[in-house]
Amino acid sequence: MTNPMVLTLAWGVGDAQPLLQAMRDCGLQPIVVNTVGEAQQALREHAIACGMVLGPDQPLPGASASCSANEAGETPHAVHWARLEDTLSEIRQHSALEWVACCAPDALQSLQLRALLMECFFDFFAYPPDWPEVAQVLRHIGKRCALRQSLRRDLQAAQTPHVGIVGQSPPIKQLHKQLRKVAQTDAPVLLFGESGSGKELAARAIHRQSSRKNELFVALNCAAIAPSLIQSELFGYEKGAFTGANARKQGLIEAADGGTLFLDEIADLPLDLQGNLLRFLQEKTINRLGGLESLSVDVRVISASHTQLERAVHEGRFREDLFYRLNVLPLTVPALRERGDDVLLLAEHFLQAGRGHRTGRLQGFSHNALMAMKNYEWPGNVRELSNRVQRAVVMGESSWISASDLGLSMPERTQVRALEQARAKAERELLEHTLNMAERNVTRAARDLGVSRMTLYRLIDKHGLILQE
Ligand SMILES: Nc1ncnc2c1ncn2[C@@H]1O[C@H](COP(=O)(O)OP(=O)(O)OP(=O)(O)O)[C@@H](O)[C@H]1O
């Protein structure tokens, strides 16, 4: 394994040479920088694994042994370290390095320094540090940094640039392929998938990859609008068509002329309007409400449903002829729980998107957050993940987002499994012990345990015990 390169900022340390030698002796390669410019250059030229700040190791001028405060209540150490904050945040704009600090023990009395250490550093040591321990922490950080970089690389690779669908699991790759194919035709597409799984995003991806991409994509959620209003929303109306129709209104179908109309929750389209939609799909013309003129419109229709439409057809809630008209190219958007590690790529994607809303520093997800996300079932799919990450970014207080910031408990399944394993182990030990006490006599052992011989045989079988009767 190569020695990790450590970007080392000598921040007012007296003689840095012995400290740098101690780092080298522990297998680290310190790359010493003094300014933000030098740090940027080092980051460009070397594969830096982590950062180290060597703070003052001697009492600072003006500081008594007990670290006296100035009029503003700041100790010389606090004043000295506070200047570092700006330097660090400038370096951070160019890299997501994690940092470790070395500081004088008395400096730790400063409230400001402690706050800075909590906010900006992965770990800290007081002089004289235990160098092998420091080296271990820096190596650990280097590994985490490499992992994060690979996650970001995968995230970039997983984003189809112009369609915005993040993911690289086999079901998502398959969906990408299908979306590209259906984008080449004008036939109606019917998207199935659980709520929040990305059906609208998939519909937009079809539009963006189709020859209609320079025209409008118009979306209507049939479940989100009062049934009495859907008719006028979709087909528009003429002036005077009903009380309150003071001017002609263009409907969404007309507005989407040349483009794509996305009808979400199509199962909620009222029965009487299903006939109108069918007529439009067959004849490619519409009549505004109260209008006599038939208008030709060229619109591609993509519809979506989170329920099985066949059941609605079977129950007489959805017209069978319309179902067949819409269901020319059926596609299913997979649930998030079927997409393996995509959940982590998506979480990172939403974290990057939400970063701007956070005032404090944000490093990423803690290990327990990653585990909790992987183990959760995500009933609300990608929308739920996006909401949980956004909330954690805004409300979380530490620089690492934890499982509880996401409102998730630690993987229950792991806990349950651990409990089951502990129970099985205890059961096996008790059986072994009792059988030994009974000199492997099943009748006696069963009596001692208070179970029937049959039960004991079953348990012996379950744990693969040997009787030697
Ligand atoms: N693969 C993905 N990559 C990035 N963002 C996604 C992905 N899938 C879904 N999203 C985001 O998740 C949210 C929900 O997606 P969308 O509205 O497309 O789901 P839906 O299946 O249409 O939901 P509903 O059934 O409730 O209408 C949106 O903000 C969308 O941008």
Image (tube, grey):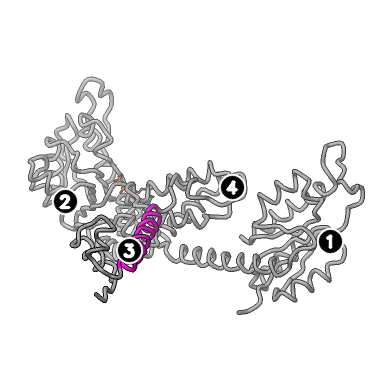
Q: Disc 4 versus disc 1: distance between alpha carbons?
A: 29 Å
To which residue does mark 2 refer? 326
To which residue does mark 1 refer? 13
> Front-most of 369 and 236?
369
Q: Is residue 216 visible?
A: no
Amino acid of disc 3: Thr
**Quadrant in the rendering for residue 435:** bottom left
Q: Is residue 385 left or right of residue 352?
A: left
Dot 3 lies on which element?
A: helix
Question: Which quadrant holds the N terminus?
Answer: bottom right
To which residue does mark 4 refer? 398
User: Which residue is at 71% across, 67% downward?
Assistant: 7
Q: Is residue 437 magenta?
A: yes
User: Which residue is at 80% across, 68% downward?
Assistant: 19
Judge the density around disc 2: few (<14), some (14-19), many (≥20) Cα neighbours within 10 Å.
many
Range covered by the magenta-colored residues? 412-438
Q: Disc 2 versus disc 4: distance between alpha carbons?
A: 49 Å
| Number of numbered tags placed on the structure image | 4
